[in-house]
Image: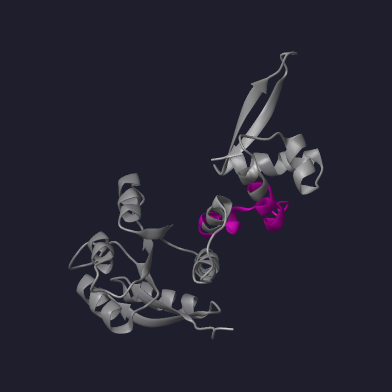
Amino acid sequence: MPELRDITVLIVDDDPVVTAALHAQVNRVLGFRVVGIAHTGHAALAAAARFAPRLVLLDLHLPDMPGLEVAHRLRRPEQPPADVIVISGRKESATVRAAIQRGALYYLVKPTRAGTLEQTLLRYAATLEQLESGDSFAEQQEIDRIFRSMHLDSASRPKSISPATEQAVLDALAEVEEDASAHELAGMIGVSRATARRYLEHLADRGLVEGRPRYGPTGRPQHRYRVR
């Protein structure tokens, strides 16, 4: 069994108060260790080259260059490979889109609660573990599951929604050719129709599942669902 190693983190923010808070929050998450802190874009690139962090927590407002430029330069061949999670106070859709285009895995809006950051880091660790297993993916749904695991936010999940059942619903829908009703899905995963409908409506509210009516001979619509 390979040796387990901490995921190394570089924190980049121009505010020392923010970096101190993030440093404490990250080091409290099991399996993560801060190896560097930078307050400018140039210092961030130098620290990334020196420490080769696995993950960079990146602010977009830096005194010497835009954080998006830092994200872009981190992807150059001469830089050690690093994943980026943006932590910024900017909420414009164009900024979020630009961060995604430059390779950001996730985007957190300031002020970020410690619990939200912890959940994001744990999802990142779970995703990284699957990607570094060395196994080949036999099915498309296995790859879909990895992408969902990074972006499925458990902090917004109601207490009545079980993570295991939620994942079972998504996996079952991913296997159907077109779509499925709540009744059909209930039979696939072994829950009641009411339970299946509750999970489907929850996932539809979150934009992970698409529901649409299908009209039969009697004119009464049946709601069908599929993974977006």
- Residue at the spot 53% in from the left edge and 79% down from the top edge: 31
Q: Residue at the top extreme?
A: 218
Q: Position of residue 222 (x, y in %)?
A: 70, 25
Between 57 and 89, the one lying in front of the other is 57
Q: Is residue 139 magenta?
A: no
Residue 213 lies left or right of residue 45; in this view the side is right
Q: Position of residue 141 (x, y in %)?
A: 58, 51
Quarter of the view holding residue 212:
top right
Residue 115 visible in the shown view: no
Q: Position of residue 142 (x, y in %)?
A: 57, 56
Q: Is residue 165 magenta?
A: yes
- Residue at the spot 73% in from the left edge and 36% down from the top edge: 182
Q: Position of residue 168 (x, y in %)?
A: 69, 52
- The quadrant of the rendering that contains the N terminus is bottom right
111 over 10 or under it: above or below: above
Quarter of the view holding residue 224:
top right
Between 135 and 20, the one lying in front of the other is 135
Residue 68 lies left or right of residue 208; in this view the side is left
Q: How is the image coloured?
A: one colour
- Residue at the spot 26% in from the left edge and 63% down from the top edge: 67
Q: Which residues lie in the magenta part?
A: 147-170
Residue 56 lies left or right of residue 116; in this view the side is left
Residue 143 visible in the shown view: yes
Q: Residue at the bottom extreme?
A: 3
84 over 175 or under it: above or below: below
